[in-house]
Image: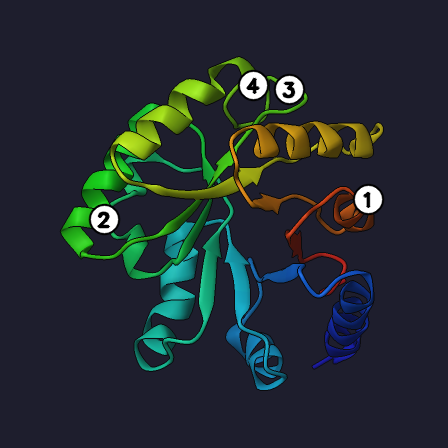
Amino acid sequence: MNMNFLHNFKTIRNEIKDYSNNVNLIVVTKNQNFEKINYLINEGHKDFGENRFQEAKTKWQDYLRKNSDIRLHFIGKLQSNKIKGIGELFQFIHSLDSIKNAELLAKEEIRSSKKLKYFIQVNIAKEIQKSGIQEEDLNDLITFCRKVDLNVIGLMCIPPVVGNSSVLFKRLQHLSSNYFLKELSMGMSNDYKDAISNGATYVRIGSLIFK
């Protein structure tokens, strides 16, 4: 097995620490086997991201039953028909984007007797092909989440690959402060440095580690 990923992980982790101790690195492990993941766990890493519920269940379910210190983050598109059971695996949801899904997640928390932490995904660049709530609808969603007692801790965005992501990160930071939300999930392999410079507290990095 090629071990370059371990070197890449250590380099990025140390680089992020040099920026700030308040930034959490989520290692995105979609399509990665557990043998590789276990090397990162043995390095003391605890935050991992998956974007497909069924893949995550197959990969993580048995391990999490015996190791409750791992923090698993759901970073993919929420599908209404797959919300049931999501709380059994994940502690963080980064892609809440509708009142309908907020209502289903509130029911899931009651069913599973487990409180999760949520980021609301904002379609900050208004891209028709991307998920995320529109900026003008954000207030209604936050109001509803607070009504049903979902623990929304911050906002999340995925800027376009091409363009000035810093402008959009700044806008999300401004929105977050308007709602007194402390956390910002923004920044991936191609733009995490810009995200950290603009207040990110969680960055989601996969391809740069496992390239």
Please report contact status of discs 4 and 1: CB closer than 8 Å, yes or no. no
State how far apart marks 4 and 2 are (Cα): 26 Å
Viewer-proximal residue among 156 and 173: 173
Disc assigned to residue 109: 2
Q: Image height check: is 107 above or below 202?
A: above
Residue highlighted by disc 3: 127
Viewer-proximal residue among 28 and 150: 150
Q: Is residue 81 left or right of residue 188?
A: left
Residue drawn at the location 76% of the way across and 76% of the way down: 10
Local packing at callout 4 (Cα closer than 10 Å; few below 14, some 14-19, many 20+) is: some
Q: Earlier in the sequence, mark 1 or mark 3?
A: 3
Q: State whether residue 187 appears in this view.
A: yes
Q: Image height check: is 73 above or below 5?
A: above
State how far apart marks 2 and 1 are (Cα): 34 Å
Please report contact status of discs 4 and 3: CB closer than 8 Å, yes or no. no
State how far apart marks 1 and 3 are (Cα): 20 Å
Residue 142 occupies which quadrant of the picture? top left
Residue highlighted by disc 4: 135
Of the two numbered discs 1 and 3 in the rendering, the one whose residue sits closer to the viewer = 1
Residue 33, how many percent across, how many down?
54, 71
Residue 52, how many percent across, how many down?
45, 50
Please report contact status of discs 3 and 2: CB closer than 8 Å, yes or no. no
Q: Image height check: is 67 above or below 61?
A: below
User: Which quadrant holds the C terminus?
Assistant: bottom right
Q: Earlier in the sequence, mark 4 or mark 2?
A: 2
